Amino acid sequence: MAKNTKGFPLTHVLGFIASLVLTFVALFVALKTSLSFKTIIWVIGSLAVIQAALQLFMFMHLNEGEDGKSNIINIASGVFIAFVAVAGSIWVMSFGM
Amino acid sequence: MSANVNTALPLEYQTEQNRMNILGFWIFLGAEIILFGTLFATFSVLNARYAGGPTPHDLFEIKGVMIETILLLTSSFTMGLAIFEMRRSNRNGLILWFVITLLLGAGFVFFEVTEFIHYVHEGATWTTSAFLSSFFVLLGTHGLHVSMGIGWATMVIIQLLRRGLTPVTARKTFIIGLYWHFLDVVWIFIFTFVYLARMVA
Protein backbone atom coordinates (compact mmCIF):
# COMPACT_ATOMS: atom_id res chain seq x y z
CA MET A 1 0.00 0.00 0.00
CA ALA A 2 2.59 2.53 -1.08
CA LYS A 3 1.47 6.14 -1.02
CA ASN A 4 3.87 7.64 -3.53
CA THR A 5 4.30 4.92 -6.06
CA LYS A 6 6.96 4.94 -8.73
CA GLY A 7 6.45 6.66 -12.05
CA PHE A 8 5.67 3.49 -13.99
CA PRO A 9 2.74 1.18 -13.13
CA LEU A 10 4.74 -2.02 -13.66
CA THR A 11 2.37 -4.38 -11.81
CA HIS A 12 -0.61 -3.15 -13.82
CA VAL A 13 1.14 -3.47 -17.17
CA LEU A 14 2.36 -6.99 -16.32
CA GLY A 15 -1.13 -7.96 -15.12
CA PHE A 16 -2.68 -6.62 -18.31
CA ILE A 17 -0.24 -8.43 -20.61
CA ALA A 18 -0.68 -11.67 -18.64
CA SER A 19 -4.49 -11.32 -18.86
CA LEU A 20 -4.31 -10.83 -22.62
CA VAL A 21 -2.05 -13.85 -23.02
CA LEU A 22 -4.36 -16.02 -20.88
CA THR A 23 -7.42 -14.86 -22.85
CA PHE A 24 -5.87 -15.72 -26.21
CA VAL A 25 -4.44 -19.05 -24.99
CA ALA A 26 -7.97 -19.99 -23.82
CA LEU A 27 -9.39 -18.92 -27.19
CA PHE A 28 -6.79 -21.02 -29.03
CA VAL A 29 -7.27 -24.11 -26.84
CA ALA A 30 -11.07 -23.94 -27.16
CA LEU A 31 -11.39 -23.34 -30.88
CA LYS A 32 -8.19 -24.46 -32.59
CA THR A 33 -7.19 -27.69 -30.86
CA SER A 34 -8.82 -31.10 -31.13
CA LEU A 35 -8.47 -32.11 -27.48
CA SER A 36 -11.40 -33.87 -25.83
CA PHE A 37 -14.24 -31.67 -24.54
CA LYS A 38 -13.42 -32.55 -20.92
CA THR A 39 -9.75 -31.61 -21.30
CA ILE A 40 -10.65 -28.30 -22.94
CA ILE A 41 -13.06 -27.40 -20.12
CA TRP A 42 -10.42 -28.17 -17.50
CA VAL A 43 -7.73 -26.16 -19.32
CA ILE A 44 -9.83 -23.06 -20.06
CA GLY A 45 -11.43 -23.25 -16.59
CA SER A 46 -7.99 -23.23 -14.97
CA LEU A 47 -6.89 -20.33 -17.16
CA ALA A 48 -9.99 -18.37 -16.06
CA VAL A 49 -9.25 -18.99 -12.38
CA ILE A 50 -5.63 -17.86 -12.86
CA GLN A 51 -6.77 -14.70 -14.64
CA ALA A 52 -9.37 -13.92 -11.95
CA ALA A 53 -6.70 -14.32 -9.25
CA LEU A 54 -4.43 -12.02 -11.25
CA GLN A 55 -7.11 -9.33 -11.32
CA LEU A 56 -7.85 -9.73 -7.60
CA PHE A 57 -4.23 -9.43 -6.52
CA MET A 58 -2.57 -7.24 -9.17
CA PHE A 59 -5.43 -4.80 -9.91
CA MET A 60 -7.66 -4.90 -6.83
CA HIS A 61 -4.86 -5.42 -4.24
CA LEU A 62 -7.06 -7.89 -2.38
CA ASN A 63 -4.54 -8.54 0.38
CA GLU A 64 -3.32 -5.01 1.10
CA GLY A 65 -3.98 -2.92 4.17
CA GLU A 66 -4.85 -3.95 7.69
CA ASP A 67 -8.08 -5.60 6.53
CA GLY A 68 -6.23 -7.72 3.95
CA LYS A 69 -6.80 -10.96 5.87
CA SER A 70 -10.52 -10.24 6.35
CA ASN A 71 -10.79 -9.53 2.62
CA ILE A 72 -9.22 -12.85 1.70
CA ILE A 73 -11.42 -14.84 4.12
CA ASN A 74 -14.53 -13.01 2.90
CA ILE A 75 -13.81 -13.45 -0.83
CA ALA A 76 -12.75 -17.07 -0.29
CA SER A 77 -16.04 -17.86 1.46
CA GLY A 78 -17.97 -16.16 -1.37
CA VAL A 79 -16.06 -18.21 -3.95
CA PHE A 80 -16.68 -21.38 -1.92
CA ILE A 81 -20.44 -20.84 -1.78
CA ALA A 82 -20.58 -19.95 -5.50
CA PHE A 83 -18.53 -23.07 -6.33
CA VAL A 84 -20.81 -25.31 -4.25
CA ALA A 85 -23.89 -23.79 -5.94
CA VAL A 86 -22.51 -24.36 -9.45
CA ALA A 87 -20.81 -27.74 -8.99
CA GLY A 88 -23.63 -29.01 -6.74
CA SER A 89 -26.32 -28.02 -9.25
CA ILE A 90 -24.50 -29.67 -12.14
CA TRP A 91 -23.87 -32.79 -10.06
CA VAL A 92 -27.41 -33.16 -8.72
CA MET A 93 -29.06 -32.46 -12.07
CA SER A 94 -26.80 -34.96 -13.86
CA PHE A 95 -28.88 -37.78 -12.32
CA GLY A 96 -32.08 -36.83 -14.12
CA MET A 97 -30.64 -36.45 -17.60
CA MET B 1 -16.48 8.53 12.60
CA SER B 2 -12.93 8.99 13.66
CA ALA B 3 -11.06 12.23 13.32
CA ASN B 4 -7.78 10.35 13.37
CA VAL B 5 -6.12 10.98 10.07
CA ASN B 6 -3.09 8.88 9.28
CA THR B 7 -1.33 10.80 6.52
CA ALA B 8 1.27 8.08 6.03
CA LEU B 9 -1.36 6.01 4.24
CA PRO B 10 -2.93 6.61 0.80
CA LEU B 11 -5.84 9.06 0.90
CA GLU B 12 -8.55 6.40 0.66
CA TYR B 13 -7.24 4.61 3.79
CA GLN B 14 -6.53 7.68 5.91
CA THR B 15 -9.61 7.62 8.15
CA GLU B 16 -11.27 4.84 10.10
CA GLN B 17 -14.53 5.57 8.25
CA ASN B 18 -12.80 5.05 4.90
CA ARG B 19 -11.27 1.75 5.98
CA MET B 20 -14.66 0.54 7.18
CA ASN B 21 -16.35 1.57 3.92
CA ILE B 22 -13.72 -0.24 1.83
CA LEU B 23 -14.01 -3.38 3.98
CA GLY B 24 -17.81 -3.14 3.69
CA PHE B 25 -17.53 -2.95 -0.07
CA TRP B 26 -15.38 -6.09 -0.14
CA ILE B 27 -18.13 -7.86 1.82
CA PHE B 28 -20.65 -6.64 -0.77
CA LEU B 29 -18.43 -8.07 -3.52
CA GLY B 30 -18.42 -11.41 -1.66
CA ALA B 31 -22.24 -11.36 -1.88
CA GLU B 32 -22.02 -10.42 -5.57
CA ILE B 33 -19.84 -13.49 -6.20
CA ILE B 34 -22.63 -15.63 -4.73
CA LEU B 35 -25.29 -13.81 -6.81
CA PHE B 36 -23.41 -14.52 -10.03
CA GLY B 37 -22.66 -18.04 -8.77
CA THR B 38 -26.39 -18.81 -8.64
CA LEU B 39 -26.85 -17.43 -12.18
CA PHE B 40 -23.93 -19.53 -13.45
CA ALA B 41 -25.47 -22.57 -11.71
CA THR B 42 -28.79 -21.96 -13.50
CA PHE B 43 -27.06 -21.54 -16.83
CA SER B 44 -24.93 -24.66 -16.33
CA VAL B 45 -27.99 -26.79 -15.62
CA LEU B 46 -30.12 -25.40 -18.46
CA ASN B 47 -27.51 -24.80 -21.14
CA ALA B 48 -28.51 -27.78 -23.30
CA ARG B 49 -32.29 -27.15 -23.14
CA TYR B 50 -32.80 -25.62 -26.57
CA ALA B 51 -36.55 -26.44 -26.92
CA GLY B 52 -36.08 -26.63 -30.67
CA GLY B 53 -34.67 -23.10 -30.73
CA PRO B 54 -31.21 -21.91 -31.77
CA THR B 55 -28.12 -23.51 -30.20
CA PRO B 56 -24.88 -21.73 -29.20
CA HIS B 57 -23.35 -22.92 -32.48
CA ASP B 58 -26.12 -21.17 -34.42
CA LEU B 59 -25.85 -17.93 -32.45
CA PHE B 60 -22.41 -17.17 -31.01
CA GLU B 61 -19.84 -15.40 -33.14
CA ILE B 62 -16.36 -15.27 -31.71
CA LYS B 63 -15.45 -11.90 -33.26
CA GLY B 64 -18.03 -9.86 -31.32
CA VAL B 65 -17.28 -11.79 -28.13
CA MET B 66 -13.54 -11.06 -28.45
CA ILE B 67 -14.23 -7.34 -29.04
CA GLU B 68 -16.33 -7.21 -25.85
CA THR B 69 -13.71 -9.17 -23.91
CA ILE B 70 -10.81 -6.94 -24.99
CA LEU B 71 -12.80 -3.74 -24.34
CA LEU B 72 -13.71 -4.80 -20.80
CA LEU B 73 -10.24 -6.18 -20.02
CA THR B 74 -8.59 -2.95 -21.23
CA SER B 75 -11.06 -0.86 -19.20
CA SER B 76 -10.11 -2.86 -16.10
CA PHE B 77 -6.45 -2.05 -16.85
CA THR B 78 -7.13 1.69 -17.35
CA MET B 79 -9.14 1.74 -14.11
CA GLY B 80 -6.03 0.33 -12.41
CA LEU B 81 -3.99 3.14 -13.97
CA ALA B 82 -6.54 5.69 -12.68
CA ILE B 83 -6.09 4.43 -9.10
CA PHE B 84 -2.31 4.40 -9.67
CA GLU B 85 -2.44 8.09 -10.62
CA MET B 86 -4.67 8.81 -7.63
CA ARG B 87 -1.99 7.42 -5.33
CA ARG B 88 0.49 9.78 -6.95
CA SER B 89 -1.94 12.62 -6.06
CA ASN B 90 -2.33 13.37 -9.78
CA ARG B 91 -5.98 14.38 -10.06
CA ASN B 92 -5.90 15.15 -13.78
CA GLY B 93 -4.20 11.85 -14.62
CA LEU B 94 -6.79 10.09 -12.48
CA ILE B 95 -9.71 11.77 -14.28
CA LEU B 96 -8.18 11.14 -17.72
CA TRP B 97 -7.81 7.37 -17.14
CA PHE B 98 -11.19 7.29 -15.42
CA VAL B 99 -12.90 8.83 -18.47
CA ILE B 100 -11.07 6.43 -20.83
CA THR B 101 -12.28 3.55 -18.64
CA LEU B 102 -15.89 4.69 -18.96
CA LEU B 103 -15.61 5.12 -22.74
CA LEU B 104 -14.30 1.55 -23.02
CA GLY B 105 -17.13 0.40 -20.72
CA ALA B 106 -19.68 2.20 -22.88
CA GLY B 107 -18.15 0.51 -25.95
CA PHE B 108 -18.59 -2.84 -24.21
CA VAL B 109 -22.27 -2.14 -23.47
CA PHE B 110 -22.80 -0.98 -27.06
CA PHE B 111 -21.38 -4.21 -28.52
CA GLU B 112 -23.31 -6.33 -26.04
CA VAL B 113 -26.63 -4.62 -26.84
CA THR B 114 -25.88 -4.96 -30.58
CA GLU B 115 -25.22 -8.68 -30.02
CA PHE B 116 -28.53 -9.10 -28.16
CA ILE B 117 -30.49 -7.24 -30.85
CA HIS B 118 -28.89 -9.49 -33.45
CA TYR B 119 -29.95 -12.59 -31.49
CA VAL B 120 -33.53 -11.35 -31.15
CA HIS B 121 -33.70 -10.75 -34.91
CA GLU B 122 -32.61 -14.35 -35.41
CA GLY B 123 -35.59 -15.43 -33.30
CA ALA B 124 -33.59 -16.04 -30.13
CA THR B 125 -35.42 -14.17 -27.38
CA TRP B 126 -35.35 -14.96 -23.70
CA THR B 127 -38.67 -16.77 -23.97
CA THR B 128 -37.46 -19.08 -26.75
CA SER B 129 -35.82 -21.75 -24.58
CA ALA B 130 -34.47 -22.41 -21.11
CA PHE B 131 -30.96 -22.06 -22.51
CA LEU B 132 -31.72 -18.55 -23.80
CA SER B 133 -33.60 -17.54 -20.63
CA SER B 134 -30.60 -18.40 -18.46
CA PHE B 135 -28.23 -16.86 -21.03
CA PHE B 136 -30.03 -13.50 -21.15
CA VAL B 137 -30.51 -13.34 -17.37
CA LEU B 138 -26.83 -14.04 -16.66
CA LEU B 139 -25.47 -11.71 -19.38
CA GLY B 140 -28.17 -9.12 -18.72
CA THR B 141 -27.36 -8.97 -15.01
CA HIS B 142 -23.70 -8.43 -15.84
CA GLY B 143 -24.49 -5.82 -18.52
CA LEU B 144 -26.80 -3.99 -16.11
CA HIS B 145 -23.98 -3.88 -13.56
CA VAL B 146 -21.66 -2.33 -16.15
CA SER B 147 -24.31 0.21 -17.21
CA MET B 148 -25.06 1.22 -13.62
CA GLY B 149 -21.32 1.40 -12.95
CA ILE B 150 -20.97 3.95 -15.76
CA GLY B 151 -23.68 6.15 -14.20
CA TRP B 152 -22.19 5.78 -10.72
CA ALA B 153 -18.66 6.56 -11.96
CA THR B 154 -19.89 9.66 -13.79
CA MET B 155 -21.21 11.02 -10.51
CA VAL B 156 -17.87 10.28 -8.81
CA ILE B 157 -16.03 12.12 -11.60
CA ILE B 158 -18.29 15.17 -11.08
CA GLN B 159 -17.41 15.12 -7.38
CA LEU B 160 -13.70 14.86 -8.21
CA LEU B 161 -13.99 17.88 -10.51
CA ARG B 162 -15.88 19.95 -7.95
CA ARG B 163 -14.14 18.95 -4.72
CA GLY B 164 -10.72 17.73 -5.82
CA LEU B 165 -8.84 14.84 -4.25
CA THR B 166 -9.84 14.50 -0.61
CA PRO B 167 -9.99 11.39 1.61
CA VAL B 168 -13.73 11.21 0.83
CA THR B 169 -13.54 11.49 -2.96
CA ALA B 170 -10.46 9.21 -2.99
CA ARG B 171 -12.41 6.57 -1.07
CA LYS B 172 -15.36 6.81 -3.47
CA THR B 173 -13.02 6.50 -6.46
CA PHE B 174 -11.21 3.53 -4.94
CA ILE B 175 -14.49 1.72 -4.24
CA ILE B 176 -15.84 2.11 -7.78
CA GLY B 177 -12.41 0.91 -8.95
CA LEU B 178 -12.93 -2.32 -7.00
CA TYR B 179 -16.43 -2.65 -8.48
CA TRP B 180 -15.13 -2.17 -12.02
CA HIS B 181 -12.36 -4.77 -11.68
CA PHE B 182 -14.91 -7.17 -10.21
CA LEU B 183 -17.10 -6.85 -13.31
CA ASP B 184 -14.14 -7.88 -15.43
CA VAL B 185 -13.54 -10.88 -13.16
CA VAL B 186 -17.16 -11.97 -13.74
CA TRP B 187 -16.73 -11.48 -17.49
CA ILE B 188 -13.69 -13.81 -17.52
CA PHE B 189 -16.00 -16.61 -16.38
CA ILE B 190 -18.77 -15.62 -18.82
CA PHE B 191 -16.22 -15.60 -21.65
CA THR B 192 -14.87 -18.99 -20.62
CA PHE B 193 -17.97 -20.97 -19.62
CA VAL B 194 -20.77 -19.30 -21.56
CA TYR B 195 -19.00 -18.60 -24.84
CA LEU B 196 -15.79 -20.62 -25.30
CA ALA B 197 -17.04 -23.82 -23.66
CA ARG B 198 -20.22 -23.76 -25.75
CA MET B 199 -18.37 -23.07 -28.99
CA VAL B 200 -15.95 -26.00 -28.78
CA ALA B 201 -16.34 -27.76 -32.11
Image: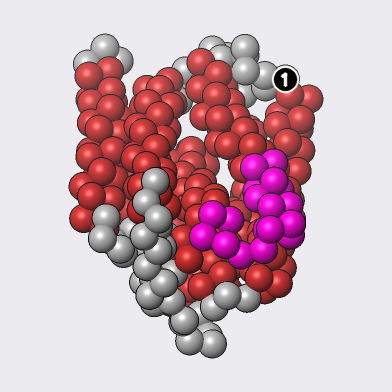
Measured as percent of width and height from the top left, residue B169 is found at: 58, 56
Report crowding for label 1: few under 14, some 14 to 19, many 20 or more residues within 10 A (C-alpha).
Answer: few
- The amino acid on which the numbered mark 1 sits, given as a three-letter code, is Gly
Spot the residue most to the front: B3
What residue appears at the point 48 percent right and 38 percent down from the top-left corner? B194
Residue B162 belongs to the span the image colors magenta: yes
Of all residues shown, which one is farthest toward the bottom?
Answer: A7
- Of B33 and A51, the residue lying toward us: B33
Identify the residue under disc 1. Answer: B123
Magenta range = B151-169
Where is residue B8, by image quadrant?
bottom left
Query: Of residues B4 and B72, which is closer to you in this image?
Result: B4
Q: For the stretch drawn in magenta, what is the main secondary structure? A: helix
Report the number of numbered marks: 1
Indicate left or right for A18 with A47 as reference.
Answer: right
Query: What's the chain of the residue with tag 1?
Result: B
Residue appearing at x 67%, y 22% in the figure: B124
Q: Residue at x 76, y 32 (%)?
A: B118
Q: Where is residue A43 in the image (x, y as percent from the top left)?
A: 32, 55
The x and y percentages for residue B75 are: 61, 59
